[in-house]
Amino acid sequence: MTSVSSASLPFPSPLTGAHGANPENSSEAAKVAPGDIAVGVVVGRASEYFDFFVYGIASVLVFPAVFFPFAGRFEGILWAFALLALAFVVRPVGTLLGMALQRRFGRGAKLTVALFLLGSSTVGIALLPSYGAAGAAAIGLLVACRIGQGLALGGSWDGLPSLLALNAPEGKRGWYAMLGQLGAPLGFLVACGLFAYLWGNLSTTDFHEWGWRFPFFAAFAINVVALFARLRLVVTHEYERELQANELEPCDTRELFRQQGHNVVIGAFAALASYALFHLVTVFPLSWVMLYSEQEISQFLAVELVGAVLAGLAMLASGWLADRFGRRNTLGTLAIAIGVFSLATPWLLGGGSIGQDAFILAGFVLLGLSYGQSAGAVAGNFLPSFRYTGSALTTDLAWLIGAAFAPLVALYLSAHFGLVAVSLYLLSGAVCTLLALRTNRWLSLRD
């Protein structure tokens, strides 16, 4: 495999000596510490989730007025949610293209291209003309940028979460598996905080003309920092050696699906409840409040900020729970809790400001507990040579079937059939998770 050497980086590698000595030639090669891997995982995931939430929040607050002014507010949000889903549709393609790029040019080159594409697509959105200025071409450019984001997110898979899990101390795997997921509440906290500040301090005209663009520029800057932080890890000799030793390299996709395709499907459905809940407590409630509630958007964004903090704390708790009771048992129990929570959705979201705030706070706690353990819950089912590609495609499929269309479907169904439809939608995700975990247990016992 071709890799980028530390000498090609714009800064000296911390793993080379004062005279550029190669640590692999020294008598004692440095050992990769789980804590160092965790830093790279959290930084990388936080930047990706920040991009994700900036787009999701803008789909409600910005895009209907800027890109879909010819439609009503409800229809405009539906169009924006359709484009939100587009990135998840092309994400598996980005993963496969990234794997091919890595085989040819190395992991560092793949990560550089992916994060450059992600940053360029994100800042490109900030520079787009409105529909009033460019007509349908503005929508076409938004579609192109969103496709770029999706391809980049798929291509940015670096194998660090799997390496972190494999290097976790005995009895602490649930804790270390949770660390990468912390990027979600961190990314949401920053994205939501930026929009809350801009929404509350700018006039409606200024916000729609230029204020909304600032978070997208900020996302580009954060991506640059994340790129260098991750490159400092994945292109060093120690990490290359560890990744190769654990067979965390691309495999033949056809061979993966021929031998262990069922594990990709089971892994995606095992996390379905968490991924469905992901959008139903972050993006969808904002659209519901915007359309059907008298609660002020600034107030609601403030509640979501509190919810993000609670989600982060709940994720920390999920690591302890998983190590004490087992990750699969924890996921199954939380899927039942999500099913019970889904039954209360109509009364909470339809119960005015107090009910909506309670939905957000309780939902974020459940999201933190469940999403904290949703990544790679059944990754151990893969043979070592299939783990890298299998884990990436399992994540892509989980996003696609669990979260991609959740805001679109939930808003459309709730508008036509009432909030009970959202309950059924979320409940179906919980049932799928329980069935997948049960199937996985049955296959494990059979083997």
Image: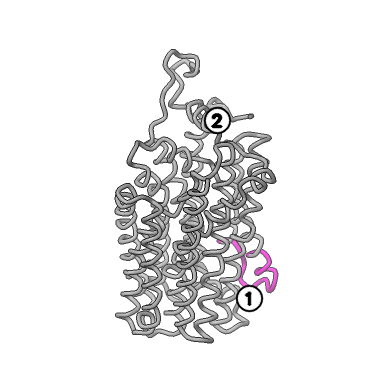
In the picture, the disc for residue 121 is none
Query: Residue at left 32%, top 81%?
Result: 353
Q: Is 136 part of what is drawn in magenta?
A: yes
Q: Is 134 part of what is drawn in magenta?
A: yes
Q: Earlier in the sequence, mark 1 or mark 2?
A: 1
Query: Circle 1 is placed at which residue position?
Result: 132
Query: Is residue 402 visible in the rendered structure shown here?
Result: yes
Quadrant assignment, res 310:
bottom left
Which segment is the magenta one? 126-142
Query: Residue at left 61%, top 55%?
Result: 91
Name the residue type under label 2.
Gln
Name the residue type under label 1.
Gly
- Residue 313 image offset from top left, x and y in percent: 30, 56
Query: Residue at left 57%, top 28%?
Result: 8
Position of the N terminus by quadrant: top right
Measured along the vertical axis of the image, is residue 68 above or below residue 323? below
Circle 2 residues within 10 Å: few <14, some 14–19, many ≥20: few
- Residue 297 image offset from top left, x and y in percent: 39, 76
Query: Is residue 214 visible in the rendered structure shown here?
Result: no
- Residue 263 image offset from top left, x and y in percent: 56, 51
- Asked which secondary structure carries label 1, the reply is helix
Cα distance in 3D space between marks 1 and 2:
52 Å
- Asked which secondary structure carries label 2, the reply is helix
Query: Circle 2 is placed at which residue position?
Result: 244
The residue nearer to you, when weighing 148 against 91, is 91
Magenta stretch secondary structure, dominant: helix
